[in-house]
Image: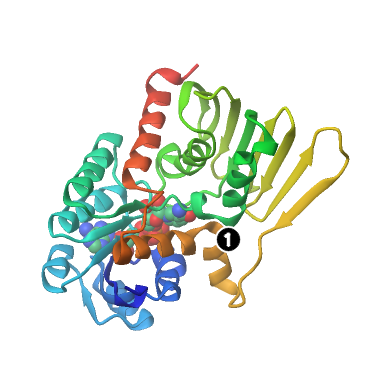
Amino acid sequence: MPASDVRVGFIGCGEHAVEVLLPAVQQVGLDLAAICDLDKRRAQRATRRFGAFRAYQDLQRMIDEMDLDAVLVCGPPELHAEAATVALHHGCHVWTEAPPAPTAAEAERIGELARERGLVAQAGLMMRFAPAYRRLRATIADEAFGAPVAFEAIYWPPALPGHDEPLLFDALHILDLVRWLLGEVAECSMALEDERAAISLRMLDGATGVVSFLWGGPWPREMVTVGSDAAVATAVDRASLTVRRRGSDEMTVWRAEALAAGGQSDTAHLRGYLSALVQFAAGVADDAPQEATISAAAATMHLIERLHRDGEV
Ligand SMILES: NC(=O)c1ccc[n+]([C@@H]2O[C@H](COP(=O)([O-])OP(=O)(O)OC[C@H]3O[C@@H](n4cnc5c(N)ncnc54)[C@H](O)[C@@H]3O)[C@@H](O)[C@H]2O)c1
């Protein structure tokens, strides 16, 4: 089934939805049937701008009335959990922004509900879909790279309004990326000071490293380095990947390619949103496997809760 046959309802029309996600939904070609926001003017404006059929203020009503295949949600975590639960009970697939729920246990419950019902439940873990990180993952999985022994991840995102728990809203992304690249965590500890955290991780497969997290500093920055005995690979700002091999001065440099459409599309493409929604649409339409499930987000949320509980040093 083509993406254009997947009939979706979109809930939550704040800035992130209107600037990034709804344009990406259009670009992927999903059939945007309805848009819902508690704020009637926002819902109506987004409905007009993105060519949806109908605006709603009540998510239950939208889901009951619109015969949707899937529901996408972008608001506070409580809204993600509520909308996902209603949608899954109604037989709709769901995509939520991250975090998919206020707690790991609630996210896990939503993941289980989706599994029981045979429905797709994807969380907005966009870093997994960014071209630079997909290339980094393929590079370090290559036999010639050798087993990763060390890593360093720097994530200093800008402060966003409403992100009152930066570890849950923002560090979630970089910690999820580390798990996706390097596997499960065996040991962890965290030094936390205001909105700054230094997180030490030892992975089950043996690699050790640190995540430097700084929320709302004056210089947004993102860099991930993974090293083995044979090579080192560094992705910078989701825009480039540099690989150096042991014993050679040569450096291979790859740069993420912009899209012909440019502008917003490039942002959505380079940050990973476009490919995330393409995979979600393929999951709904053709049962394609999903990588960034709500259950995967729940596992990273458990790690964050563990860091808070017994990982602080
Ligand atoms: N991954 C990223 O790069 C990234 C970036 C920015 C934001 N986000 C995430 O996106 C989400 C939303 O961010 P935002 O800045 O657009 O938020 P926002 O506060 O601007 O918008 C949220 C919208 O949800 C609506 N809403 C709240 N409860 C509702 C309900 N019960 N029914 C219908 N609508 C309801 C509000 O009226 C509002 O319009 C957050 O979860 C945030 O973490 C992710």
Q: In the picture provided, is 183 more to the left or to the right than 99?
A: right
SS label for mark 1: helix
Residue 129 in the image, given as x and y percentages of width and height:
50, 54
Q: Label 1: which residue?
A: 270
Residue at 39% across, 65% down: 17
Residue at 48% across, 36% down: 179
Residue 167 in the image, given as x and y percentages of width and height:
45, 37
Identify which residue, 32 or 263, lies in the foreground. Answer: 32
Q: In the picture provided, is 145 more to the left or to the right than 76?
A: right
Q: Amino acid at mark 1?
A: Leu
Q: Is residue 27 visible?
A: yes
Residue 4 in the image, given as x and y percentages of width and height:
34, 77
Q: Is residue 12 visible?
A: no
Number of disc labels: 1
Identify which residue, 182 or 268, lies in the foreground. Answer: 182
The relative height of residue 17 versus residue 119 in the rendered view (above or below) is below
Residue at 57% across, 51% down: 134
Q: Quadrant of the N terminus?
A: bottom left
Q: Quadrant of residue 169?
A: top left
Identify which residue, 268 or 42, lies in the foreground. Answer: 268
Whereabouts is ligand 1, in terms of quadrant?
bottom left
Q: In the picture provided, is 201 more to the left or to the right than 249?
A: left
Q: Quadrant of residue 56?
A: bottom left
Residue 57 in the image, given as x and y percentages of width and height:
19, 69
The relative height of residue 135 versus residue 213 in the rendered view (above or below) is below
Q: Quadrant of residue 28?
A: bottom left
Give the crowd class for mark 1: few <14, some 14-19, many >=20 residues within 10 Å.
many
